[in-house]
Image (cartoon, grey):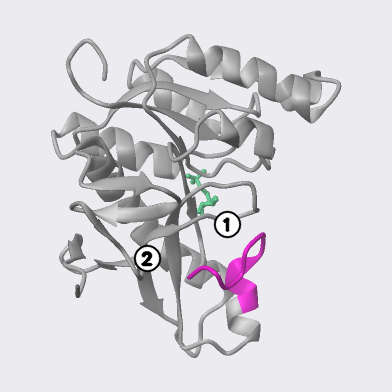
Amino acid sequence: MNARGRASAAILISGGGSNLQAVIDANVCGDSAMDIALVVSNRPNAGGLKRASDANITNICIDHTQYPNRRAFEIALKEVIDSHEVDFLLLAGFMRILTAQFVANYSGKIVNIHPSLLPAYTGLHTHQRALDANDAWHGCSVHFVNAELDGGPIIAQGRVPVQDDDSAESLAARVLVVEHKILPCIANLLAQRSIEYVDGQVHFEQRALHMPLIFDVDSGQIAKPCV
Ligand code: GRF
């Protein structure tokens, strides 16, 4: 908790930062109990750094190309994060794979948003892969991060129907709209401790989840899990 008695997050980015902006906007208009302690990018030209500056949020670039190896980069990353009051790490378009060693420092505190209905389509090019597979549904997942790429217990998912005339770009754009709603929502629930990571499982309102929470795109709310 920070000096305001609120949970705070370090948000890690690599690109434009539209997901970061969604969390900033939710925080600014009082829709989220999650403060943002700092933004860290591994790329100097990430547009998200300007979004952070415009919102007067501390932002730092730790350029992974300036380090001899992944371990050295992660040591620098950890040093910056730990020098701020951080309760959670939100990976919002962060495109570096984090080692098990790094993840172990923040067990149950790292959350990622991934543009697919996990466990389908871990990794890249998720929208094209969903089209190639003729999937009827696609979407995004928010999950706790463990040592596996896009692994870890899934917290919530938001779905969009795949349309016959969809391209990877049009599908990605519709999924991104859902990402911008689900991430601030989950950040808020994490800050309120409505969602917790307990012994490798997602707990929602003190009950272990046996399936991801369904994010209702129209209402912008989590549908109550069927217990
Ligand atoms: C988003 O689709 C996110 O899920 C993926 O990167 C894309 C861009 O994110 N990881 P942002 O605009 O940089 O937040």
Magenta-highlighted residues: 117-129
Task: Report if residue 4 is visible in the image.
Answer: yes
* Residue name at image x 49 percent, y 71 percent: 170
Residue occupying the far right of the picture:
68
Q: Nearer the viewer, residue 118 or 135?
A: 118
* Up/down of 182 relative to 189, above or below: below
| Magenta span includes 106 | no
Q: Secondary structure under badge 1?
A: loop
For residue 76, which quarter of the picture?
top right
Q: Is residue 139 left or right of residue 121?
A: left
Image spot of residue 73 (x, y percent) = 72, 22
Mark 1 nearby-residue class (10 Å; few <14, some 14–19, many ≥20)? some
Q: Amino acid at mark 2?
A: Gln
* Residue type at numbered disc 1: Gly
The residue that mark 2 highlights is: 157
Whether the residue under disc 1 has CB within 8 Å of ligand 1: no
Q: Which residue is mark 1?
A: 151
